[in-house]
């Protein structure tokens, strides 16, 4: 009897212990109620995830729609420069030289000679524009270099720009540039300036020309606000391969460069030396002069080399053969990390042009 009572008490004790254990576990399994946003608003939104976290890793692929509108940027990253080949592969898949010669404000004879001298010196990229009035002269300089066996057409990368007054008539403007340059295709055409009233029409004309094989790559120039760049990108299909903006040590375009990286768009610097009439300001900058002396090169060469190492395609302008040779002679020295940091510190957010 006594034994039975003891057994009953043990059984009761076990039951009590089991009941306590159950309570403890259930408390652990139900911690504080969900602290985050309500379930329905926690569904991943690709746009906001990308903007807020700056990373696509926050996106749950299972909830990601198969194809979104062009407003959703692909985090393709900033294009990498190949210093051996002296080129970069654009987001269009085409290779582009990272150093070229610019034709702004050159007369016909200057543009023809400079194009020819540039190709002789090793340049493989020429930057012109319909508004410079020297596309035909560039075509002649190119043809001369081809005739002399210096280059083939395929080895040369020609950029031209569609001027704003042609934006409503883009198809014809492209054909006219092809005629003036005397080429079957243009490697890169860019819209010369943002013009919200009709730049989308002009860009769509360039997209048609890509499909027709008249243009290899297309891009933009003079878009200085991320919102303005996105306005055009969101209304069109082909991501701009390149953005050409005023860029030099006193205006380094960091914000736009970061922004366009999400489209795999590369930055190209116009006024890389400060522009005609301003070059002495940069050439005589103490930091730039100091670095030039350390390497036994000119200030112009230091600035060009800085552009390239910073990931900016660089197109200095010149009508002087010696300067052209000098501007291409930038492959045998390299700015150190400290020198690159010194150059970065020159940023003043100061443009030389007023447009
Ligand atoms: N998208 C746009 O709105 C836009 C606007 C402006 C320019 N761009 C493009 O960007 C290109 C470059 O701009 P930019 O030509 O106006 O300005 P830049 O290249 O900054 O400067 C040109 C000036 O630099 C001088 N120069 C060049 N190499 C030199 C050297 N080694 N030593 C001393 N001086 C040197 C040139 O004089 P010399 O002739 O005597 O060599 C000229 O006076 C243009 O040609 C054009 O293709 C585009």
Image (cartoon, rainbow, N blue to C red):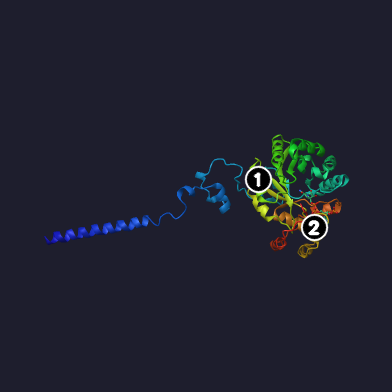
Q: Which residue matches tag 2?
A: 300
Please name the residue shown 67% across and 47% down the image: 229
Q: Secondary structure at mark 1?
A: helix
**Residue 155 screen position, x and y as percent:** 76, 42
The Cα atoms of the two marked residues, 1 and 2, are separated by 36 Å
Q: Is residue 125 above or below residue 347?
A: above
Q: Which residue is mark 1?
A: 231
> How many numbered discs sit on the rendered protein?
2
- The quadrant of the rendering that contains the N terminus is bottom left
Whether the residue under disc 2 has CB within 8 Å of ligand 1: yes
Mark 1: few/some/many CA within 10 Å (<14, 14-19, 20+): some
Which dot marks residue 272? none
Q: Residue furthest front?
A: 197
Query: Which structural element holds mark 2?
Result: helix
Q: First in sequence: mark 1 or mark 2?
A: 1
**Residue 304 seen from this side:** yes
Whether label 1 touches label 2, CB < 8 Å: no
Density class for disc 2 (Cα within 10 Å; few <14, some 14-19, many ≥20) is many
């Amino acid at each position: 009897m006594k034994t039975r009572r003891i057994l009953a008490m043990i059984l009761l004790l076990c039951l009590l212990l089991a009941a306590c254990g159950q309570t403890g576990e259930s408390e652990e399994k139900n911690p504080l109620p969900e602290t985050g946003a309500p379930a329905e608003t926690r569904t991943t939104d690709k746009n906001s995830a990308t903007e807020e976290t700056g990373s696509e890793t926050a996106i749950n692929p299972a909830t990601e729609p198969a194809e979104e509108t062009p407003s959703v940027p692909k985090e393709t990253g900033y294009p990498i420069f190949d210093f051996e080949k002296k080129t970069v592969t654009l987001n269009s898949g085409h290779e582009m030289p990272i150093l070229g010669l610019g034709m702004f404000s050159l007369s016909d004879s200057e543009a023809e000679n400079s194009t020819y001298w540039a190709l002789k010196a090793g340049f493989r990229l020429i930057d012109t524009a319909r508004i410079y009035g020297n596309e035909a002269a560039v075509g002649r300089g190119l043809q001369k270099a081809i005739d002399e066996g210096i280059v083939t057409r395929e080895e040369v990368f020609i950029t031209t720009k569609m001027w704003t007054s042609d934006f409503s008539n883009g198809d014809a403007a492209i054909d006219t540039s092809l005629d003036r340059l005397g080429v079957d295709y243009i490697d890169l055409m860019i819209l010369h300036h943002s013009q919200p009233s009709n730049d989308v029409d002009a860009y769509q004309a360039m997209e048609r020309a890509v499909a027709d094989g008249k243009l290899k790559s297309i891009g933009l120039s003079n878009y200085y606000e991320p919102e303005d760049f996105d306005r055009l990108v969101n209304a069109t299909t082909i991501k701009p391969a390149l953005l050409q903006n005023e860029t030099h040590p006193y205006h380094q375009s960091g914000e736009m460069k970061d922004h366009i990286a999400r489209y795999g768009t590369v930055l190209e610097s116009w006024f890389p030396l400060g522009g005609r009439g301003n070059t002495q300001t940069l050439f005589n900058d103490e930091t730039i002069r100091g670095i030039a002396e350390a390497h036994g090169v000119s200030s112009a060469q230091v600035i060009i080399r800085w552009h390239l190492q910073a990931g900016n395609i660089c197109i200095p302008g010149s009508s002087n053969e010696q300067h052209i040779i000098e501007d291409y002679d930038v492959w045998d020295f390299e700015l150190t990390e400290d020198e690159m940091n010194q150059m970065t510190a020159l940023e003043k957010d100061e443009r030389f042009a007023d447009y």
